[in-house]
Image (spheres, rainbow, N blue to C red):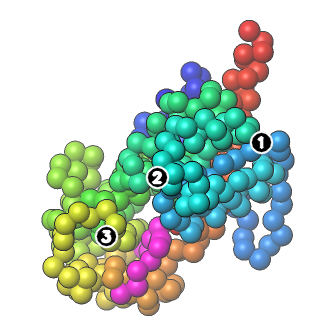
Amino acid sequence: MQLTADGKLKHFLTTEGIPPLLLEEILDRAQQFVSLPGKAQVKAPLLRGKTVMNLFFENSTRTRTTFELAAKRLSADLVNLDIRNSATSKGESLLDTIRNIEAMGCDMFIVRHSSSSAAHFIAKYCAPHISVINAGDGRHAHPTQAMLDMLTIRQHKPDFTPLKIAIVGDIKHSRVARSEIHALTTLCAGEIRLIAPHTLMPSGIEQMGVNVYNNMEQGLKNVDVVIMLRLQHERMNTALLPSVREYYARYGLTEERLKLAKPDAIVMHPGPVNRGVEIDSQVADGPQSVILQQVTNGVAVRMAVMAMTMASQASLANEGEVK
Ligand code: CP
């Protein structure tokens, strides 16, 4: 559903099934858009005349703001729909909300929702000239997060094939982990290790081609990249951990544990970071941390994806006119 007949990006709903060349194109385009904090920001006219609607049904700091900055740096008009004060609270259905926004004139929906299929649903039912970008749906996918993580890894370690990458923490509830596994597999990463207690490891996850560890010390040995995840209490229906203190004692990333990874290993975290729960402050703010670089790359990756989807829509419109 997310690709056009000639393999271009129409929507961006998941990293699953995206061909390697297209993932690399996203990374290459994004690299061109990277601009460092403190430097003058150059505006590109690629989305001039386009209207982008941020539809965030769940809270967000990084994703919502970087999509907004990305849209503005591409010269689009952007509206943040205030979901809490919208007619959703009066019982309006998601589909009716979409139809009404379409009627106002809109070219792109950026969707974050607690339901695992919300972005696909909107892509299925919205008008054909609209592109939908998944900004995180339930436990399912967070494709732009995965791509900004891939860009950050590539900036430090350009060849994915020899890399050992550990993803640590609440894998069970993590849309980021799923999207990263798909992207890393397509980019031919050497080894993907998942490290978590049994209760936070989805059963059968080995089928995705990953190696599973329940012991942090064993899993971290000689890795090139450590990706820490937050405990997602909002998606836990039952108590899955004895206590946060015990979790930190066994799975928290401390300076001592980080020494088990390669000396030049990088430490990543999609945020929000819970210091003293999954990661020690000394590590989060330490020399191996690239956590804020991930955030900077978020703007660039979102600019790339927005530009690519709108270019696909322009080609489709041209083809329609020619016919
Ligand atoms: N990484 C991430 O999705 O952060 P936000 O929830 O702040 O958008």
Residue drawn at x 83%, y 42% as measured from the top left: 49
Report, in whole angstroms, how far the alpha carbon at label 2 lies from the one at label 1. 23 Å
Q: Position of residue 172 (x, y in %)?
A: 27, 59
2 vs 1, front mark: 2
Query: For this view, does 185 lie left or right of residue 237?
Result: right
Circle nearer the N terminus (1, 3): 1
Q: Is residue 299 left or right of residue 167?
A: right
Which residue appears at 34% of the width and 66% of the height?
234
For disc 2, the marked residue is 113
Ligand 1 near label 1 (Cβ, under 8 Å)?
no
The residue lying at 23 percent from left, 63 percent from top is 237
Work out which residue is located at the far top of the displayed protein and give it: 323
Give the residues drawn in magenta, as a range.
Answer: 265-276
Tell whether 174 sits left or right of 10: left
Q: Residue 24: in sight, yes or no?
A: no
The three-letter code of the residue at mark 3 reads His
- Residue 12 picture location, percent across and down: 54, 41
Q: How crowded is the residue under tag 1: few (<14 C-alpha within 10 Å), some, or many (20+)?
A: some
Q: Secondary structure at mark 2?
A: strand
- Residue placed under numbered mark 3 in the picture: 233
**Earlier-in-chain disc, 2 versus 1:** 1
Q: Which residue is mark 1?
A: 50
The correct choice, above or below, for 224 with respect to 189 in the image is below
Residue lying at 64% horizontally and 38% vertically, measured from the top left: 100
Chief secondary structure of the magenta portion: loop
